[in-house]
């Protein structure tokens, strides 16, 4: 479904992504883990078409994505951002936010689709005419997911979807993402610095360090400690140490 | 007793309604490390801010006792509070991006904090700033002292904040979500640094966070807050024996690397938790 081959991204003379390659099968879920500055979000943004300065190959469903994406591309691929406070328009109601995509893509049944989108992410219909500031962080992230799903994409790119949320809300959102993937056969690429979150949602993951993907392994190998790169082992040890209560 | 809080209540009043955000919190702290854990809106930050009298003017604070080292905070004047804030109790905030002055070098900001409370010359202050940056494990303190906040990383920015708070040698450090804007690796480094500095200097620490297992590694005691009340207080080492369903729920709903779960258990909130 997704093929990324020798992706290189530079900001000016500084190369931040240096030859990253990975594949994700249809209905699969791939996690990218790394520290800040490792280039993991930059990879995702290039895939979403938010950055046109890249070289290499990015292909969805067998077709190479051009540098400038046509509108139809965004019906196939959608993205959810980290901060639910910053990614929703503060002066637009949820109804307006959700209907924008439908209007842009000239989809019929706006009324029905918005109702469906809200119930898909387990939000009450009363939310529809509220503003983002009237919702909690978890509800806002649900709106962001509903907005991404309303155009019925096949691929969802998730950039730290739960790191701005409470752990209790994080559990709800992670469950929601898992359910939606199963129900709609979606393909996910998830970026996070939290190894436990990645391993929970993604059977396959890649570890990034200084713009390179230093290792790709399965979540089971990671749990069992079959890591090859020292950085992966370090991240694993840290995650295990901190997740157990003292 | 460094901090003594008895039956603290904080309410926000508008023309038509009254919202009680903190409803009878009591806690005591000596020279030890206390973690306050809870979800957003549980009143953990408000409790810490009340101690420094840093609440917005529409907040109504009442308490049977609210004291820092024997000084009554509720009755203290602004002038009196300035003798406590920064000098005797430091406050580390969540996001270094928004808490540092963007148009001053980090060295001069630390020097300013040192000079305000220690009264020395500019030169002494500049030297002290470099020494403090060294204490928070910054590799090239001289170079970093001359940098502006936008030129340093988030983790480094948080170290600068810690250096600034340590400058006046406070007796108490309040850290309000000091690492939630940071990476997992940096998070651990910063908490270890705070832990180490607090132990070495014999200070008290109030660490506010929503990550229960994380806090338990760096604190002696943990108070779990829910909807403006402390529902459970226990030793960090006895977290596994937590009794309250809310505490257990918070522990269970974390995804775990070593104990994978098909679905994460979600907190089912019981109305009885509101009024124990």
Image (spheres, rainbow, N blue to C red):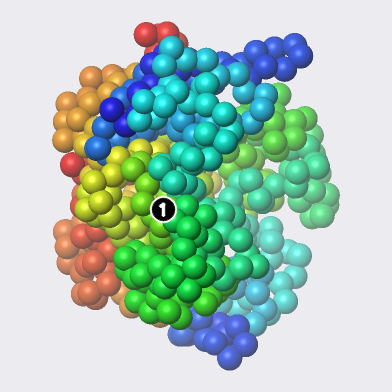
Q: Nearer the viewer, residue B251 or B86?
A: B86
Q: Residue at x 53, y 75 (%)?
A: B147
* Disc 1 chain ID: B
Residue B180's place in the image compared with A109, above or below, is below
Q: Nearer the viewer, residue A156 or B76?
A: B76
Q: Is residue B202 left or right of residue B173?
A: left
Q: Which residue is mark 1?
A: B168
So how many labels did they put on this image?
A: 1
Q: State which quadrant residue A128 falls in.
A: top right
Q: Position of residue A20 (x, y in %)?
A: 45, 80
Q: Nearer the viewer, residue B42 or A145?
A: B42
* A219, above or below B235, in the image: below
Most foreground residue, B216 or B79: B79
* Residue A24 picture location, percent across and down: 44, 66
Residue A198 position by quadrant: bottom left
Q: Give coordinates of residue A69: x percent, y percent.
A: 71, 72
In the rendered image, which quarter contains the C terminus of chain A? top left
Q: Residue at x 45, y 85 (%)?
A: A19
Label 1 sits on a secondary structure element that is loop
- Residue drawn at x 45%, y 23% as measured from the top left: B72
Is any atom of residue B42 visible in this view? Answer: no
Q: Residue furthest bottom?
A: A13
Is residue B226 placed above or below B96 in the rendered structure? above
Is residue B233 among the parts visible in the rendering?
Answer: yes
For the point 27% across and 72% down, the residue is A231
Place of residue B131 in the rendered image (x, y in percent of width and height, measured from the top left): 36, 70
| Label 1 CA crowd tier, 10 Å (few <14, some 14–19, many 20+) | many
């Amino acid at each position: 479904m997704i093929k990324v081959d020798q992706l290189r991204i530079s900001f000016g003379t500084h190369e931040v992504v240096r030859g990253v390659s990975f594949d994700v099968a249809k209905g699969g879920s791939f996690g990218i883990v790394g520290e800040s500055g490792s280039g993991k979000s930059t990879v995702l943004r290039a895939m979403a078409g938010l950055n046109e300065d890249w070289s290499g190959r990015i292909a969805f469903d067998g077709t190479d994505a051009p540098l400038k994406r046509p509108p139809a591309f965004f019906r196939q691929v959608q993205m959810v951002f980290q901060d639910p406070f910053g990614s929703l328009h503060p002066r637009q109601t949820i109804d307006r936010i959700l209907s924008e995509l439908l209007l842009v893509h000239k989809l019929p049944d706006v009324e029905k689709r918005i109702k469906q989108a809200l119930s898909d992410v387990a939000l009450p219909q009363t939310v529809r005419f509220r503003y983002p500031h009237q919702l909690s962080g978890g509800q806002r992230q649900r709106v962001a997911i509903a907005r991404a799903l309303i155009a019925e994409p096949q691929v969802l790119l998730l950039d730290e979807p739960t790191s701005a949320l409470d752990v209790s809300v994080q559990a709800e959102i992670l469950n929601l993402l898992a359910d939606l993937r199963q129900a709609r056969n979606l393909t996910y690429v998830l970026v996070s610095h939290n190894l436990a979150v990645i391993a929970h949602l993604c059977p396959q993951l890649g570890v990034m360090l200084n713009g390179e993907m230093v290792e790709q392994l399965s979540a089971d190998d990671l749990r069992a400690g079959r890591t090859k790169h020292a950085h992966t082992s370090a991240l694993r040890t840290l995650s295990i140490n901190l997740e157990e209560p003292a | 007793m460094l901090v003594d809080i008895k039956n603290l209540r904080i309410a926000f009043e508008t023309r038509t309604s009254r919202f009680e955000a903190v409803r009878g919190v009591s806690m005591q702290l000596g020279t030890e490390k206390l973690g306050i854990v809870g979800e957003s809106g549980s009143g953990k930050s408000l409790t810490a801010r009340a101690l420094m009298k840093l609440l917005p003017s529409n907040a109504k604070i009442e308490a049977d006792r609210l004291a820092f080292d024997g000084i009554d905070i509720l009755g203290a004047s602004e002038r009196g509070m300035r003798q406590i804030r920064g000098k005797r109790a430091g406050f580390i905030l969540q996001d270094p991006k928004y808490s540092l002055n963007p148009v001053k070098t980090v060295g001069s900001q630390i020097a300013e904090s040192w000079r305000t409370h220690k009264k020395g010359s500019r030169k002494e202050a500049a030297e002290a700033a470099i020494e403090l940056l060294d204490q928070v494990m910054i590799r090239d303190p001289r170079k970093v002292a001359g940098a502006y906040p936008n030129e340093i990383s988030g983790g480094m920015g948080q170290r600068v904040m810690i250096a600034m708070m340590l400058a006046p040698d406070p007796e108490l450090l309040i850290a309000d979500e000091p690492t939630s804007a940071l990476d997992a690796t940096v998070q651990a480094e910063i908490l270890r640094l705070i832990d180490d500095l607090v132990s070495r200097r014999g200070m008290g620490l109030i660490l506010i966070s929503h990550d229960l297992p994380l806090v338990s590694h760096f604190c002696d005691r943990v108070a779990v807050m829910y909807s403006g009340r402390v529902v459970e207080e226990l030793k960090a080492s006895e977290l596994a024996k937590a009794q309250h369903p809310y505490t257990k729920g918070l522990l269970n709903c974390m995804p775990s690397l070593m104990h994978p779960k098909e679905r994460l258990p979600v907190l089912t909130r019981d109305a009885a938790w509101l009024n124990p």
